[in-house]
Image (cartoon, rainbow, N blue to C red):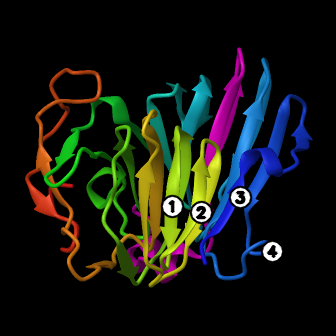
Amino acid sequence: MAITVNQKQVQGEVIAPGVTRQRLMTTASNAATSVWLDRYTLTAGGCLDIDVAPGHLAWFQVLAGALALSGESRSDRLDEAHVCFLPPGFRGRAAAAAGAVVLYAEVPHAVRFDPAIAHGALALRIVDWTREPVLDSEHDARKRIYLVTPKLFGTEAIKGEMIIYPPGTLGANHHHEGAEHFMYVLQGSGTGWANEQPFAVREGDLIWYADLERHYLRSDADVELRFVEFFVPGKYKTIWAPGANVCTWAPTGRNIRGGAASREIAYHRSDTSTPADV
Protein backbone atom coordinates (compact mmCIF):
# COMPACT_ATOMS: atom_id res chain seq x y z
CA MET A 1 0.00 0.00 0.00
CA ALA A 2 1.19 3.52 -0.77
CA ILE A 3 2.81 5.49 2.03
CA THR A 4 1.19 8.86 2.70
CA VAL A 5 2.14 11.59 5.12
CA ASN A 6 0.84 15.13 5.39
CA GLN A 7 3.21 17.99 6.18
CA LYS A 8 1.01 18.95 9.15
CA GLN A 9 1.74 15.56 10.74
CA VAL A 10 5.51 16.07 10.67
CA GLN A 11 7.09 18.02 13.49
CA GLY A 12 9.59 20.64 12.43
CA GLU A 13 13.08 21.04 13.87
CA VAL A 14 15.00 24.33 13.94
CA ILE A 15 18.33 23.64 12.24
CA ALA A 16 19.58 27.23 11.97
CA PRO A 17 18.32 30.69 12.95
CA GLY A 18 15.12 31.25 10.95
CA VAL A 19 15.20 27.78 9.32
CA THR A 20 12.88 24.89 10.21
CA ARG A 21 13.13 21.45 8.59
CA GLN A 22 10.42 18.81 8.31
CA ARG A 23 11.71 15.34 7.33
CA LEU A 24 8.85 14.12 5.12
CA MET A 25 10.67 10.95 4.05
CA THR A 26 13.96 9.33 4.99
CA THR A 27 15.33 5.80 4.90
CA ALA A 28 14.50 5.66 8.62
CA SER A 29 10.78 6.22 7.93
CA ASN A 30 10.76 4.17 4.71
CA ALA A 31 13.57 1.67 4.27
CA ALA A 32 12.59 1.09 0.62
CA THR A 33 13.04 4.67 -0.55
CA SER A 34 16.00 5.98 -2.54
CA VAL A 35 15.04 9.61 -1.92
CA TRP A 36 15.30 11.88 1.12
CA LEU A 37 12.55 14.49 1.06
CA ASP A 38 12.46 17.58 3.29
CA ARG A 39 10.29 20.67 3.58
CA TYR A 40 12.10 23.81 4.73
CA THR A 41 10.46 26.94 6.09
CA LEU A 42 12.63 30.06 6.18
CA THR A 43 11.47 33.14 8.05
CA ALA A 44 12.57 36.63 7.02
CA GLY A 45 16.37 36.71 7.11
CA GLY A 46 16.71 32.93 7.34
CA CYS A 47 19.68 31.29 5.58
CA LEU A 48 19.90 27.62 4.60
CA ASP A 49 23.37 26.19 4.04
CA ILE A 50 23.34 23.54 1.28
CA ASP A 51 25.98 20.84 1.06
CA VAL A 52 25.35 18.03 -1.43
CA ALA A 53 27.70 15.12 -0.77
CA PRO A 54 29.90 13.79 -3.58
CA GLY A 55 27.99 11.12 -5.48
CA HIS A 56 24.62 12.51 -4.37
CA LEU A 57 22.38 14.82 -6.35
CA ALA A 58 19.56 17.07 -5.20
CA TRP A 59 16.90 19.42 -6.43
CA PHE A 60 14.43 21.79 -4.84
CA GLN A 61 11.30 23.68 -5.73
CA VAL A 62 10.26 26.98 -4.17
CA LEU A 63 6.70 26.54 -2.91
CA ALA A 64 6.25 30.04 -1.51
CA GLY A 65 8.24 33.26 -1.21
CA ALA A 66 11.64 33.91 -2.75
CA LEU A 67 15.29 32.98 -2.24
CA ALA A 68 18.71 34.29 -3.18
CA LEU A 69 20.83 31.24 -4.04
CA SER A 70 24.60 31.62 -4.04
CA GLY A 71 27.15 28.98 -5.00
CA GLU A 72 29.47 27.84 -7.80
CA SER A 73 30.62 31.45 -8.31
CA ARG A 74 27.15 32.68 -9.19
CA SER A 75 24.08 34.16 -7.54
CA ASP A 76 20.46 33.63 -8.60
CA ARG A 77 17.09 34.87 -7.40
CA LEU A 78 14.48 32.13 -7.21
CA ASP A 79 10.74 32.28 -6.54
CA GLU A 80 7.66 30.06 -6.92
CA ALA A 81 8.33 29.71 -10.64
CA HIS A 82 11.63 27.88 -10.17
CA VAL A 83 12.99 24.36 -9.79
CA CYS A 84 16.72 24.10 -9.11
CA PHE A 85 19.02 21.12 -9.75
CA LEU A 86 22.08 20.75 -7.50
CA PRO A 87 24.93 18.56 -8.76
CA PRO A 88 27.09 16.26 -6.63
CA GLY A 89 29.44 18.23 -4.39
CA PHE A 90 27.46 21.49 -4.62
CA ARG A 91 27.95 23.87 -1.72
CA GLY A 92 26.00 27.08 -1.38
CA ARG A 93 23.50 29.10 0.59
CA ALA A 94 19.84 30.00 0.13
CA ALA A 95 18.79 33.22 1.86
CA ALA A 96 15.22 34.45 2.27
CA ALA A 97 14.86 38.19 2.75
CA ALA A 98 11.11 37.99 3.39
CA GLY A 99 10.55 34.26 4.01
CA ALA A 100 10.18 31.17 1.84
CA VAL A 101 9.03 27.54 1.79
CA VAL A 102 11.07 24.93 -0.11
CA LEU A 103 10.49 21.30 -1.08
CA TYR A 104 13.96 19.69 -1.13
CA ALA A 105 14.85 16.21 -2.38
CA GLU A 106 18.18 14.38 -2.41
CA VAL A 107 19.19 11.08 -4.00
CA PRO A 108 22.11 9.45 -2.19
CA HIS A 109 24.62 7.45 -4.25
CA ALA A 110 22.92 8.56 -7.45
CA VAL A 111 25.65 7.01 -9.61
CA ARG A 112 23.83 3.68 -9.23
CA PHE A 113 21.04 5.17 -11.37
CA ASP A 114 23.21 7.08 -13.84
CA PRO A 115 26.87 6.00 -14.21
CA ALA A 116 27.61 9.23 -16.11
CA ILE A 117 27.41 11.09 -12.79
CA ALA A 118 30.83 9.66 -11.90
CA HIS A 119 32.40 11.73 -14.69
CA GLY A 120 31.50 14.97 -12.90
CA ALA A 121 29.86 16.65 -15.90
CA LEU A 122 26.72 17.84 -14.09
CA ALA A 123 26.26 21.51 -13.13
CA LEU A 124 23.82 23.75 -11.31
CA ARG A 125 20.70 24.26 -13.45
CA ILE A 126 17.59 26.36 -12.85
CA VAL A 127 14.28 25.93 -14.67
CA ASP A 128 11.41 28.43 -14.77
CA TRP A 129 8.55 25.95 -15.03
CA THR A 130 6.00 28.70 -15.77
CA ARG A 131 7.64 29.15 -19.19
CA GLU A 132 7.89 25.43 -20.00
CA PRO A 133 5.39 23.87 -22.46
CA VAL A 134 1.97 22.81 -21.23
CA LEU A 135 0.86 19.45 -22.64
CA ASP A 136 -2.79 18.36 -22.80
CA SER A 137 -3.91 14.80 -22.15
CA GLU A 138 -5.62 13.30 -25.18
CA HIS A 139 -8.18 11.26 -23.21
CA ASP A 140 -9.12 13.55 -20.30
CA ALA A 141 -8.70 17.11 -18.98
CA ARG A 142 -5.28 16.73 -17.31
CA LYS A 143 -2.31 18.95 -18.10
CA ARG A 144 1.42 18.19 -17.73
CA ILE A 145 4.48 20.40 -17.35
CA TYR A 146 7.90 18.72 -17.25
CA LEU A 147 10.15 19.90 -14.41
CA VAL A 148 13.08 17.48 -14.29
CA THR A 149 14.21 15.67 -17.44
CA PRO A 150 17.47 14.55 -19.09
CA LYS A 151 17.28 17.53 -21.46
CA LEU A 152 16.75 20.04 -18.64
CA PHE A 153 19.07 18.62 -15.96
CA GLY A 154 21.44 16.34 -17.85
CA THR A 155 20.82 13.08 -15.95
CA GLU A 156 18.54 10.04 -16.10
CA ALA A 157 18.78 9.45 -12.35
CA ILE A 158 15.56 11.40 -11.77
CA LYS A 159 12.54 12.60 -13.71
CA GLY A 160 9.77 14.93 -12.61
CA GLU A 161 6.71 16.84 -13.74
CA MET A 162 3.76 18.88 -12.54
CA ILE A 163 0.31 17.42 -13.20
CA ILE A 164 -2.92 19.45 -13.10
CA TYR A 165 -6.32 17.77 -12.67
CA PRO A 166 -9.30 20.09 -13.27
CA PRO A 167 -12.27 19.45 -10.95
CA GLY A 168 -13.76 15.96 -11.28
CA THR A 169 -10.97 14.53 -13.45
CA LEU A 170 -10.13 10.81 -13.28
CA GLY A 171 -6.77 9.36 -14.35
CA ALA A 172 -6.17 5.83 -15.64
CA ASN A 173 -4.95 2.90 -13.55
CA HIS A 174 -1.31 1.97 -14.21
CA HIS A 175 2.00 1.03 -12.63
CA HIS A 176 5.68 1.64 -13.26
CA GLU A 177 8.43 -0.91 -13.70
CA GLY A 178 11.93 0.08 -12.64
CA ALA A 179 11.29 3.18 -10.51
CA GLU A 180 9.83 4.34 -7.25
CA HIS A 181 7.40 7.22 -7.54
CA PHE A 182 6.35 9.98 -5.19
CA MET A 183 3.92 12.89 -5.39
CA TYR A 184 3.65 16.09 -3.38
CA VAL A 185 0.21 17.74 -3.49
CA LEU A 186 0.47 21.49 -4.03
CA GLN A 187 -3.25 22.29 -3.94
CA GLY A 188 -6.68 20.72 -4.02
CA SER A 189 -8.04 17.38 -2.86
CA GLY A 190 -9.30 14.10 -4.23
CA THR A 191 -9.10 10.33 -3.95
CA GLY A 192 -6.13 8.13 -4.73
CA TRP A 193 -6.00 4.40 -5.30
CA ALA A 194 -3.06 2.09 -4.62
CA ASN A 195 -3.55 -1.52 -5.75
CA GLU A 196 -7.27 -0.65 -6.00
CA GLN A 197 -7.49 0.49 -2.35
CA PRO A 198 -8.81 4.10 -2.00
CA PHE A 199 -7.37 6.80 0.24
CA ALA A 200 -7.98 10.53 0.67
CA VAL A 201 -5.63 13.04 -0.97
CA ARG A 202 -5.22 16.64 0.19
CA GLU A 203 -2.90 19.63 -0.03
CA GLY A 204 0.43 19.02 1.69
CA ASP A 205 0.35 15.24 1.22
CA LEU A 206 3.43 13.29 0.25
CA ILE A 207 2.40 10.06 -1.51
CA TRP A 208 5.00 7.36 -2.19
CA TYR A 209 4.44 4.38 -4.46
CA ALA A 210 6.78 1.43 -4.60
CA ASP A 211 7.97 0.00 -7.90
CA LEU A 212 5.14 -2.04 -9.54
CA GLU A 213 2.39 -0.59 -7.31
CA ARG A 214 -0.78 0.16 -9.31
CA HIS A 215 -2.19 3.64 -8.77
CA TYR A 216 -4.40 6.43 -10.09
CA LEU A 217 -6.15 9.58 -8.87
CA ARG A 218 -9.39 11.52 -9.14
CA SER A 219 -9.78 15.17 -8.17
CA ASP A 220 -12.79 16.25 -6.13
CA ALA A 221 -15.69 17.71 -8.09
CA ASP A 222 -15.26 21.28 -6.86
CA VAL A 223 -11.49 21.86 -6.83
CA GLU A 224 -8.45 21.69 -9.06
CA LEU A 225 -5.88 19.12 -7.91
CA ARG A 226 -2.26 20.04 -8.62
CA PHE A 227 0.84 18.04 -7.65
CA VAL A 228 4.46 17.49 -8.54
CA GLU A 229 5.64 13.93 -9.07
CA PHE A 230 9.12 12.45 -9.32
CA PHE A 231 10.58 9.11 -10.34
CA VAL A 232 13.86 7.56 -9.22
CA PRO A 233 15.48 6.50 -11.43
CA GLY A 234 14.15 8.59 -14.31
CA LYS A 235 14.31 5.71 -16.76
CA TYR A 236 11.46 3.22 -16.31
CA LYS A 237 8.50 1.61 -18.06
CA THR A 238 4.81 2.41 -17.54
CA ILE A 239 2.23 -0.39 -17.80
CA TRP A 240 -1.48 0.40 -18.15
CA ALA A 241 -4.25 -1.71 -16.62
CA PRO A 242 -6.38 -3.76 -19.07
CA GLY A 243 -8.88 -1.47 -20.79
CA ALA A 244 -7.27 1.74 -19.56
CA ASN A 245 -6.40 4.53 -21.97
CA VAL A 246 -2.67 4.95 -22.45
CA CYS A 247 -1.72 8.50 -21.48
CA THR A 248 -0.84 10.53 -24.54
CA TRP A 249 0.28 14.14 -24.36
CA ALA A 250 -0.34 16.74 -27.04
CA PRO A 251 1.57 20.02 -27.33
CA THR A 252 -0.32 23.29 -26.84
CA GLY A 253 2.53 25.62 -27.77
CA ARG A 254 1.72 27.67 -24.67
CA ASN A 255 3.03 27.97 -21.14
CA ILE A 256 0.96 28.13 -17.96
CA ARG A 257 0.99 31.93 -18.18
CA GLY A 258 -0.73 31.76 -21.58
CA GLY A 259 2.31 32.95 -23.51
CA ALA A 260 4.51 31.13 -25.99
CA ALA A 261 6.39 28.18 -24.47
CA SER A 262 10.16 28.39 -24.07
CA ARG A 263 10.65 25.27 -26.23
CA GLU A 264 8.76 22.63 -28.18
CA ILE A 265 7.82 19.12 -27.05
CA ALA A 266 6.17 16.84 -29.59
CA TYR A 267 3.13 14.62 -29.12
CA HIS A 268 4.09 11.44 -27.24
CA ARG A 269 2.77 8.50 -25.23
CA SER A 270 3.61 7.72 -21.60
CA ASP A 271 4.31 4.03 -22.19
CA THR A 272 7.45 4.78 -24.20
CA SER A 273 10.90 5.94 -23.16
CA THR A 274 11.42 9.64 -22.50
CA PRO A 275 11.48 11.42 -25.88
CA ALA A 276 14.69 13.25 -26.79
CA ASP A 277 12.93 16.63 -26.89
CA VAL A 278 11.65 16.28 -23.30
Residue linked to disc 4: 28
Mark before the other along the chain sequence, 4 or 2? 4
Give the residue drawn at x 80%, y 74%: 28
Asked whether 96 falls inside the magenta stretch, the response is yes
- Name the spot of residue 94 as percent of width and height, x first: 67, 33
- Name the spot of residue 79 as percent of width and height, x first: 52, 25
Q: How many marks?
A: 4
**Secondary structure of the residue carrying numbered label 4:** loop
Mark before the other along the chain sequence, 1 or 4? 4
Residue linked to disc 3: 5
* Residues shaded magenta: 92-121
Residue 10 against residue 49 in the figure, above or below = below
Residue linked to disc 1: 192
Position of 79 compared to 158: left or right?
right
Tell me the amino acid under the disc marked 4: Ala
* Cα gap from disc 2 to disc 1, whole angstroms: 5 Å
Q: Which quadrant would residue 145 be assigned to in this image?
A: top left
